Image: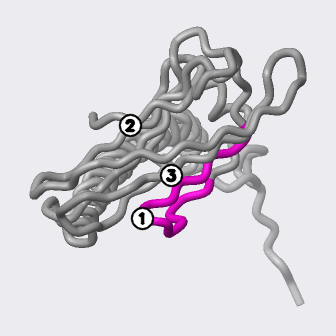
Amino acid sequence: MKTDLVLRPASAGRPRSSPARRLGPAILMLVMGSVPAFLASAQELSRDQMKGLDEQVQEIKSDVLGIAAELNTLEERLLFPSNTQVAVFIALAENEDLRLDAVEISINGEPVAHHIYSFKELEALQGGGVQRVYTGNIPTGNHEIAVSVLGKLPSGKEVTESASFGFDKDVEPALVGVTLAGVSSGSSGIKVGEW
């Protein structure tokens, strides 16, 4: 068996590189260079989408809060029509040093409200705030409201005060204000008036 021996130049042993093989590293570098730009644009697009989504969520929250406020107003009008509605408010007179602990309200001998005050509520009242302690329905005519107050003076002495007052309810809603003033002076510190 005879074999022909063919001599080739030294470079002939290696396969010739095609133009695609020579451009391969360049294409790879080009693709690798564009990946961070692609990711950055994707992240920016994602941020823009998240920002838009967050704005939509805030709009929806605002709409829901508006609807809830309207529903509360509608519910109050349905439950407490203006021709039978009565609301009782509590306020402390300016510079009143009573630490109010609890208030109990009765209308026509029937207890309608009892409230025990937290520190924050008392702080709000001492700062000039007014609290609605009762909203209900009563017919037109003459009625009696009884107010009982429990609290402490700065000296630590406990104060229990009660008073009854008459008021008239007409077709309009009745707004009854209970103001605590001068409880420490020994006189009746409960004043009731229509607001």
Rendered image: mark on residue 146: 3
Q: Earlier in the sequence, mark 2 or mark 1?
A: 1
**Front disc: 2 or 1:** 1
User: Horizontal and vertical percent for residue 59?
Assistant: 29, 47
Dot 1 alpha-carbon crowd within 10 angstroms: few under 14, some 14 to 19, many 20 or more: some
> Which residue carries the number 1 mark?
108
Q: Is residue 78 left or right of residue 145?
A: left
Q: Is residue 134 left or right of residue 29?
A: left
From what the image shows, is residue 95 above or below residue 105? above
User: Horizontal and vertical percent for residue 148?
Assistant: 62, 47
Q: Amino acid at mark 1?
A: Asn
Q: Is residue 158 left or right of residue 180?
A: right
Determine whether the residue tagged by mark 2 lies in a helix, strand or loop. strand
User: Horizontal and vertical percent for residue 184?
Assistant: 70, 18
Give the quarter of the figure containing the C terminus: top left
From what the image shows, is residue 82 above or below residue 116? below
Question: Considering depth in this image, is 149 or 75 the residue closer to the camera?
Answer: 149
Magenta span has 104? yes
Q: Amino acid at mark 2?
A: Gly
- Looking at the image, the residue that sits furthest to the top is 95
Task: Give the extent of the magenta segment.
Answer: 101-114
Tell me which corner region of the image, top left, top right, bottom left or bottom right, holds residue 2: bottom right
Q: Earlier in the sequence, mark 1 or mark 3?
A: 1
Q: Amino acid at mark 3?
A: Ala
Determine whether the residue tagged by mark 3 lies in a helix, strand or loop. strand
